[in-house]
Image: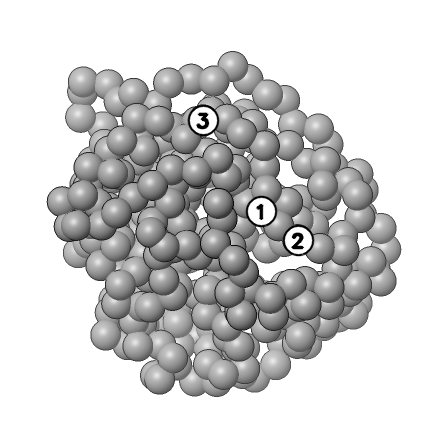
Amino acid sequence: MEAAPRPHEISRRTAFGVLATGIAAVAAPPELHPRLQTAPRSDVLPDAMPKRMPTIFIAHGAPPLLDIESWVDELARWGRALPTPKSILMLSAHWEQRPITLGATRAVPLVYDFYGFPQKYYEQQYAAPGAPDLARRVKELMGAVEHDVVESERGLDHGAYVPLVAMYPKVDVPVLQMSLPSLEGPELFALGKTLTPLRDEGVLIVGSGFLTHNLRRIDFGPEPATPAWAEEFDAWAADALTRRDVDALVDFERRAPGVEIALPTTEHFVPVLAALGAAADETKIAFPITGFWAGSLTRRSVQFG
């Protein structure tokens, strides 16, 4: 049984109504193209040691991201530039649950965890192969640090499948989703460090969220202005990430400028801390996608390694 909604989840449901209303107010986007599905492939790793994978953080947009051709193109180019993963471990802002829970260990229906959108967004498909072998490996790593890990029948939520539709449209990479056990920065950074060995096993570790996320301040006007608080927070995050200032990043609720308005709730920021932890001592950091959407939502995405 899934855990009951937390207070911040209830507030996000209300905010989703604001987002959906704003999207409906603009011109209707073109229909989503159906995605081809391919036969599942095994996520068993080959005997040869693969190249060490980077870890990444994706600004995952919302269901309408897939109607924004330029954003889809940016994600597609990024996916092609990355080493080909044997499997993907996804940590999305939209699933907080303790004990740590693994979903999509096999191909199961998507979770349409949004409200008030046009029907076509509830018809999007992404039948990624399941990743049972990766699930066993995650349990092994977590068990070494005394973490309980359970499995569920939960499918990929929109924080997971929306960017993957753009980055891996062939739907041939096994995907496993892992819940965030909490929203505490130090804990999620430590969780990422525990997952680091997966990078040498061909696994792409992905945090998915938004570095700024205040749905009550979005602007779907024709030329939305980016408010100063969003620019300042985005610049602070970029600087701290570039310098690998772990102390500042895990303590972002006290150190980041304008955090109260940039992040009324923190679930969309903290996946970057798991990706940062999994990167270990990686010094190569890049921002494959930048800019803002709907005025104040930074699209800044991060690649470590």
Q: Position of residue 76 (x, y in %)?
A: 54, 39
Q: Identify whether 138 is placed above or below 212.
A: above
Marks 1 and 2 in Cβ contact (< 8 Å): yes
Crowding at label 3, few (<14), some or many (≥20) Cα neighbours within 10 Å? many
Crowding at label 1, few (<14), some or many (≥20) Cα neighbours within 10 Å? many
Apparent side of residue 51 relative to residue 20 in the rendered image (left or right): left
Q: Which mark is residue 16?
A: none
Q: Amino acid at mark 1?
A: His
Q: Position of residue 127 (x, y in %)?
A: 56, 27
| Mark 1–mark 2 distance (CA, rounded to whole Å) | 8 Å
Between 248 and 110, the one lying in front of the other is: 110
Name the secondary structure under disc 1. helix
The residue that mark 2 highlights is: 114
Q: Nearer the viewer, mark 1 or mark 3?
A: 3
Marks 2 and 3 in Cβ contact (< 8 Å): no
Q: Nearer the viewer, mark 1 or mark 2?
A: 2
Q: Amino acid at mark 2?
A: Phe
Q: Quadrant of residue 69?
A: top right
Between 61 and 146, the one lying in front of the other is: 146
Q: Determine the residue positioned at 48% across, 35% down.
A: 153
Residue at far top of view: 39
Apparent side of residue 273 relative to residue 70 in the rendered image (left or right): left
Counting residues from the N terminus, which is met first, the one under dot 1 or under dot 2? 2
Q: Amino acid at mark 3?
A: Arg
Q: Which mark is residue 158?
A: 1
Counting residues from the N terminus, which is met first, the one under dot 2 or under dot 3? 3
